[in-house]
Amino acid sequence: MFGLADCNNFFVSCERVFRPDLNGRPVIILSNNDGCVISRSNEAKRIGIKMGQPFYQLKQTIQRYDVAVFSSNYILYGDLSKRVQMTLQSLVPATEVYSIDESFLDLRGIEHDKLDDLGHHISYVVQRNTGIPISVGIAPTKTLAKIASKLCKQYPKLRGSCYMHRPEDIEKVLKKFPIEDVWGIGRRFSAMLKSRNILTAYDFTQMPMSLVQSLMHVGGVKTWRELRGEPCVEFEEMVKDKQQITVSRSFSKELTDVHDIQQQVALFTSMAAEKLRKQGSVCNSIMVFLLTNRHKEDKPQQFANRLIRLPVPTDSTLELVNVAARTTEELVQVPYEYKKAGVILSDITPKSAMQTVLFDEVDHDKQDKLMNALDAINKKQGPRSVVVASAGFDGVKMNREHLSPNYTSEWSDILVVKS
């Protein structure tokens, strides 16, 4: 058996942990630059606020229903996600982190008559320890566990856990479950299946396997088998190293000054390099890209990018920032106004297998010690306690007018209990 622990309205729940006065009140979380809605409380859903809806369209709704609005606070959400994952790891044999708010649970070997109680226990303990409500789905396959967890959210009477294992119950659920909501189907395949009158997950399971394979190849057959109760998606306890690392952001306003743009690109490069070191890897290539605001059709448009192949693989922030700064200077042109920028680290390999060159001028041992010290200080004192000067000290130039405090990671933001 497999389980899926899915945090309910995760970003909203994170804000409510430290603001219990928000319980029962509509709450929304906005994307970068406070652009659109990326998380909603159940109360916000009931008054008609849609996922992805632009913020500027909601002014009247917010005033009418007293909606609480927050800018996305990923430092807070990431920290609470780690706390949820640590709690889950203490309750089951193994976990696989799927996303910031979802983890698969390996329940193989646990007696089946104990799984229902275990699911409810997991849900209770996670909320008690972290304040985050979760929905636990338990089923014979990962795909069915995802469906079971969604049922949990739809039916509060399940009390945080759904153990879906009897064939007749699974068939009943699949007959009502929309094909577009099945994990692994996707928008393109769901449109194709609907054109063939395949509207539910059950309809999909009744297709001949040969037809599924001809239309959707190996991935489709795996999903088809999973829905029929045959485990095909492996449980991966170890997180795979990323083969490409991207950090990009939109700016609060268009930038034209090359030094301002270089500073932002240097910051993104620093963030990417830190992720690279965290997984023990080096990169062989770096791409810098710049975009203008496509919504301003009266302005000149450009998508500029350049891929740089490095002479020696590296994980050094200093080396990567230097390359990114030179590349940015070459890309920025008048009269373009840039709204977004980013860096992509690629050709990633394990640092243990790093190939050097005989006449390399960089002292890699010295660089390693410096980067280790940088990471250690930032881990202990908080993110960006020590930065590369070219990345500046002001962070990303974004609109975050509704940002909540970093309750768990900044000394100045820790809640004070008054007697």
Image (cartoon, rainbow, N blue to C red):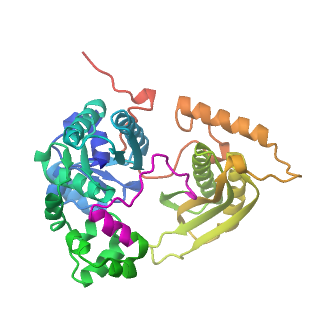
Outermost residue toward the top? 419
Q: Tag count in the figure?
A: 0
The image shows residue 32 at horizontal and vertical percentages of 41, 55
| Foreground pick, 342 / 222 | 222
Q: Is residue 389 magenta?
A: no
Q: Would you say 331 lies left or right of 106 here?
A: right
Q: Quadrant of residue 365?
A: top right
Q: Is residue 227 magenta?
A: yes
Which range is magenta? Answer: 220-245
- Residue 99 appears anywhere in the view: no
Main secondary-structure element of the magenta-colored stretch: loop
Outermost residue toward the right? 359
Q: Would you say 301 lies left or right of 77 here?
A: right
The image shows residue 256 at horizontal and vertical percentages of 59, 63
| Foreground pick, 22 / 237 | 237
Q: Residue at x 40, y 30 (%)?
A: 413
Q: Residue at x 37, y 67 (%)?
A: 222
The image shows residue 107 at horizontal and vertical percentages of 32, 44
Identify the image quadrant of the C terminus.
top left
| Foreground pick, 21 / 222 | 222
Outermost residue toward the bottom? 196
- Residue 84 appears anywhere in the view: yes
Q: Would you say 204 lies left or right of 389 here?
A: left
The image shows residue 368 at horizontal and vertical percentages of 72, 39
Q: Is residue 406 above or below residue 236?
A: above
Q: Quadrant of residue 285?
A: bottom right
Q: Residue at x 40, y 41 (%)?
A: 94
